[in-house]
Image (tube, grey):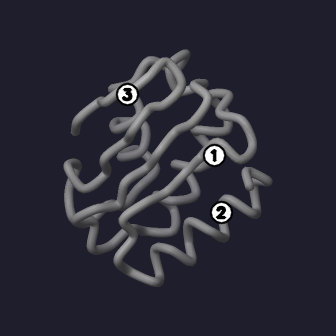
Amino acid sequence: MDRIKDTDTMIKIELGKEGRFLSGRSRVSEILGKFDPNALRADEVQISFADVESCSQSFVSELVFKLKEFGVQKGKIKVSDIADKEIERRVSTELHRLDMI
């Protein structure tokens, strides 16, 4: 996974570099553990789903929950490169459910 910090206000999480099939809450902790929690409070967190073919509901739920728990503000989670409509639906549902949009 590339941990890219383009500016002081944006963190990019490239999930496709973690695998094509992502599932499980513990996997989220493993991925986010590579980042400084204070950095995740940046102005914007961009999550790239490039090369991700499948992503479980529990993975998406935990990812959004943990980002909120780390202090990422409402409206500051941006997603990109989602090729699968089911993943897109899951992400959108979780962002709305946790009032992050």
Q: Which is nearer the N-term, disc 1 or disc 2?
A: 1
**Residue at the image point whose x is 74% and y is 63% from the top:** 96
Are the residues flagged by discs 1 and 2 in contact, CB closer than 8 Å?
yes
Are the residues flagged by discs 1 and 3 in contact, CB closer than 8 Å?
no
Give the camera-side residue of 14 and 29: 14
**Residue at the image point whose x is 22% and y is 65% from the top:** 51
Q: CA distance from mark 2 to mark 3?
A: 26 Å
Report helix, strand or loop for mark 2: helix
Q: Residue tagged by mark 3?
A: 6
Query: Which amino acid, by three-letter code, is at mark 1?
Result: Phe
Q: Is residue 6 above or below residue 30?
A: above
- Which disc, if any, is residue 65? 1
Measured from the top left, where is residue 27 in percent x and y? 36, 46
Are the residues flagged by discs 2 and 3 in contact, CB closer than 8 Å?
no
Give the camera-side residue of 13 and 7: 7
Q: CA distance from mark 1 to mark 2?
A: 8 Å
Measured from the top left, where is residue 89 in percent x and y? 56, 77
**Residue at the image point whose x is 57% and y is 25% from the top:** 42
Measured from the top left, where is residue 23 in percent x and y? 36, 61
Q: CA distance from mark 1 to mark 3?
A: 24 Å
